[in-house]
């Protein structure tokens, strides 16, 4: 879904303990954060497109402006 909305192949990670502040491949980043429930944002297009994995099970959102 992120790719369909224009996400590039890389994203910037905010939160997620050991991932915070890193730029990762989008697939790799999603693999690392989905299901971990540790409150992580993946910034795909700054200010326009992001993914949020919340701290509660199943709390997942695509944020698009």
Image (cartoon, helix red, strand yellow):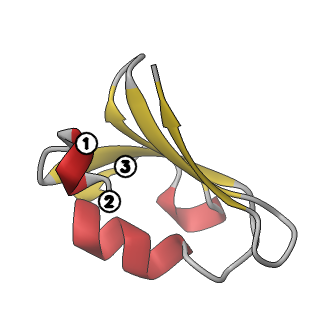
> SS class of the residue under badge 2?
loop
Distance from label 1 to label 2 (Cα)? Answer: 6 Å
In-image side of 65 versus 18 (left or right): left
Residue that carries the numbered disc 1 in the rendered image: 5
Q: Marks 1 and 2: CB-CB under 8 Å? A: yes
Instruction: Give how far across and how far down residue 13 sits, in percent.
Output: 45, 48
Query: Which residue is painted at 63% across and 54% down in the image?
Result: 40
Residue that carries the numbered disc 3 in the rendered image: 22
Quadrant, the N terminus: bottom left
How busy is the neighbourhood of tag 2: few (under 14 within 10 Å), some, or many (20 plus)?
few
Query: Which residue is painted at 68% across and 80% down in the image?
Result: 36
Distance from label 3 to label 2 (Cα)? Answer: 22 Å
Distance from label 1 to label 3 (Cα)? Answer: 22 Å
- Image quadrant in which you'd find residue 64: top left
Query: Where residue 1 is drawn, which disc sits there?
Result: 2
Query: Which residue is painted at 28% across and 74% down in the image?
Result: 28
How busy is the neighbourhood of tag 1: few (under 14 within 10 Å), some, or many (20 plus)?
few
Instruction: Give how far across and how far down residue 48 sits, in percent.
Output: 38, 21
Q: Nearer the viewer, residue 18 or 31?
A: 31
Q: Nearer the viewer, residue 53 or 13?
A: 53
In-image side of 38 versus 26 (left or right): right
- Image quadrant in which you'd find residue 9: bottom left
């Amino acid at each position: 879904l992120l790719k369909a909305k224009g996400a590039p192949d890389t994203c910037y990670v905010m939160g997620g303990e050991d991932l915070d502040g890193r730029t990762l491949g989008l697939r790799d980043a999603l693999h690392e954060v989905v299901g971990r429930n540790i409150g992580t944002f993946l910034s795909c297009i700054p200010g326009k497109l992001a993914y949020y994995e919340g701290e509660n099970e199943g709390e997942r959102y695509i944020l698009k402006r």
